Amino acid sequence: MQIIRSVSRIRDPYVKRILSNTIGKDAFAVYSRTPDKLTRLVRGLRRAELRRSLAKGKWSIAQIINHLYDSELVMGFRYRMAIAQPRSRLQAFDERKWAERLRYESTDPEAKLELFVKMRRDHVTLLRALRPRDWKLWGMHEERGRETIDRMVQMMAGHDINHLRQIENIRRKIKG
């Protein structure tokens, strides 16, 4: 896996922001450690605290957990498409619509966390089994273009860092 040293050549603002979280980091290590870090961050929080939003229109920890779970579900499919059917079309998804229509605010955050942890660990196992050349297999993302397995993991690691920071901030403010 390639370690990102700079994002200066990346044009897409979202990709640039997310990948900037992984500069100089081993993205696969970040990706692999996220389940344990997330579990530690939410340990000891009551359900009401998990569901508490700090501002109107801002996600609660429970909603972030739901989003991480759904993102992992989508990425698992994308990994499998790129590995089993290279050059396949990779569909984008609208996280706001998913959050609203899948009612992130009312699902069981503990159950979603458990499912996220199991799915992520399964994906880590899948990815560890890849040969070095397999990390260059790719699919065609409908918005971002060609994405290798390597880039997908880098994106997920940056995405993880972003949301773990949000959860740390919310927890700090809730616990005062």
Image: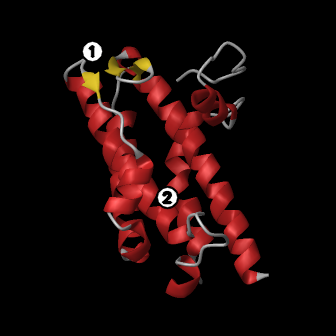
Quarter containing the C terminus: bottom right
Please, what is the three-letter code of the amino acid marked with disc 2? Pro
Q: In this view, does 49 lie above or below 142?
A: below
Is residue 53 rendered to the left or right of residue 47? right
Residue 107 position within the rendered picture, expressed as x and y whole percent measured from the top left: 36, 74
- Regarding mark 1 in the picture, which secondary structure is present there? loop
Which residue corresponds to the image point at 37% horizontal and 77% vertical from the top-left? 108
Disc 2 from disc 1: Cα separation: 29 Å
Q: Residue at x 56, y 64 (%)?
A: 59
| Viewer can see residue 120 | no
For marks 2 and 1 on the same chain, the one whose residue lies earlier in the sequence:
2
- Amino acid of disc 1: Arg
What residue is pinned by disc 2?
35
Up-down relation of residue 42 to residue 93 (above or below): below
Q: Position of residue 128 (x, y in %)?
A: 39, 35
Q: List the residue tagged with mark 1.
A: 87
Label 2 Cα crowd, 10 Å radius (few <14 / some 14-19 / many 20+): many
Could you say which disc has been placed on residue 108 in the image? none
Label 1 crowd (10 A; few <14 / some 14-19 / many >=20):
some
- SS class, disc 2: helix
Task: Look at discs 2 and 1 and give the one toward the viewer.
Answer: 1
